[in-house]
Image (tube, helix red, strand yellow):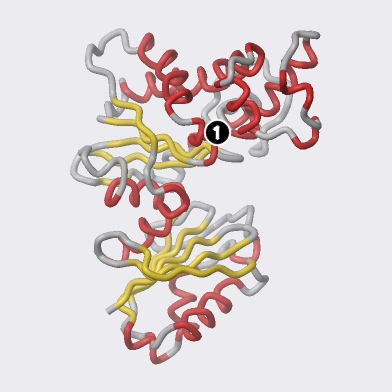
């Protein structure tokens, strides 16, 4: 029997056939259409005999309740206020009645994927943070218990308030959220602000301002650009200090860093650790901070783990 993972994004839907040991044997993707669930069902029917499928797990970019309800989904508004897994099973029809279907938040499922098959599998407890355009992730307590919270918003790291005097508004409506600094978007914004504050030389000034990306900033910083390095330290200093706060609340064995910004590698880990360890005044054994291993496959693998269980 086969397991299918689906990773739903705002621009593309990725599919993969996942083995029980976490290998993706087959993969393909389509552009995200208006009829998301109908397209998923059709793709699976086209590629497989439904009798061969044991389970289908999917990630969605929004909070999913224990009952499978998705109240909001900013990047794929056509499926907000729906039960994605239940609706997928219905669209598979009578031939798919035996198939177990499940859906979960993309950040939390990426955490589950790393915990089961990747960088976090050697730890009993871990916090994963994905650093991209925004910030996602999840919290796993000892015994493999994923924290969802009473209102399904646990581990929404993006919107932890970290700065009081921020004048720009976050997408959530607040001001001074972690996402406004410790994300790819936040890093680019801070680098631009730094260039506006002074005439300090920087290799970043040679890049079209509208095309500047987070990787440009981290690459420049790693190459010795002082302005870029200061911007990275400023932005991800916030993340390190939040890790210190989390450690005296849940005390995980490790923090797993994923997402596009994590491609900065050990340099980024060192920056985060610089602000993390000084905050641990009552702990002599800080958690490890390590890079994720599964890349963009983490969410799909976590989704399949839901139906394997």
Quadrant (top left, top right, bottom left, bottom right) of the N terminus: bottom left
Q: Residue furthest front?
A: 223
On screen, residue 182 versus residue 294, left or right, reads right
**In which image quadrant can residue 98 be found?**
bottom left
Residue lying at 29% horizontally and 29% vertically, measured from the top left: 250
On screen, residue 259 versus residue 117, left or right, reads right
Query: As displayed, is residue 41 above or below residue 224?
Result: below
On screen, residue 75 versus residue 298, left or right, reads right
Callout count: 1
Query: As displayed, is residue 93 above or below residue 53?
Result: below
What is the secondary structure assignment of the residue under circle 1? helix
Residue lying at 50% horizontally and 36% vertically, measured from the top left: 263
List x then y, in percent, for residue 266: 42, 26
Quadrant (top left, top right, bottom left, bottom right) of the C terminus: bottom left
List x then y, in percent, for residue 125: 25, 37
**In which image quadrant can residue 82 be found?**
bottom right
List x then y, in percent, for residue 207: 77, 29
Residue lying at 52% horizontally and 64% vertically, measured from the top left: 14
On screen, residue 11 versus residue 16, left or right, reads right
On the image, numbered disc 1 is attached to which residue? 159
Query: As displayed, is residue 303 above or below residue 100?
Result: above
Q: Residue furthest bottom?
A: 94
Residue count near mark 1 (Cα–Cα under 10 Å), binned few <14, some 14–19, many ≥20: many
List x then y, in percent, for residue 103: 42, 63
Residue lying at 35% horizontally and 39% vertically, measured from the top left: 139
């Amino acid at each position: 029997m086969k397991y299918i993972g689906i990773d739903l994004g705002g621009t593309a839907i990725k599919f993969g056939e996942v083995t029980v040991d976490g290998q993706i044997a087959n993969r393909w993707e389509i552009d995200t259409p208006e009829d998301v669930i109908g397209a998923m069902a059709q793709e699976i029917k086209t590629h497989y005999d439904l009798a061969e499928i044991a389970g289908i797990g999917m990630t969605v970019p929004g909070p999913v309740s224990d009952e499978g309800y998705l109240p909001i989904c900013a990047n794929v508004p056509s499926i907000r206020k729906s039960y994605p897994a239940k609706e997928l099973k219905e669209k598979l029809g009578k031939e798919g009645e035996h198939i177990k279907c499940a859906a979960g938040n993309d950040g939390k499922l990426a955490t589950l994927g790393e915990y089961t098959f990747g960088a976090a599998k050697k730890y009993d407890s871990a916090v994963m943070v994905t650093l991209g355009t925004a910030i996602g992730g999840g919290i796993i307590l000892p015994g493999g218990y994923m924290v969802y919270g009473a209102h399904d918003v646990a581990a929404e790291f993006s919107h932890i308030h970290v700065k009081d005097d921020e004048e720009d508004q976050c997408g959530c409506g607040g001001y001074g959220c972690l996402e406004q600094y410790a994300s790819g978007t936040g890093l680019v914004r801070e680098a631009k602000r730094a260039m506006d504050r002074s005439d300090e030389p920087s290799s970043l000034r040679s890049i079209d301002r509208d095309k500047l990306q987070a990787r440009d900033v981290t690459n420049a910083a790693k190459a010795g650009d002082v302005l870029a390095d200061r911007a990275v330290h400023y932005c991800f200093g916030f993340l390190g200090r939040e890790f210190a706060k989390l450690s005296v609340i849940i005390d995980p064995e490790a923090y797993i860093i994923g997402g596009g910004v994590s491609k900065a590698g050990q340099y980024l880990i060192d920056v985060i650790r610089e602000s993390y360890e000084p905050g641990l005044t009552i702990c002599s054994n800080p958690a490890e901070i390590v890079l994720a291993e599964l890349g963009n496959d983490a969410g799909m693998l976590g989704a399949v783990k839901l139906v394997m269980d």
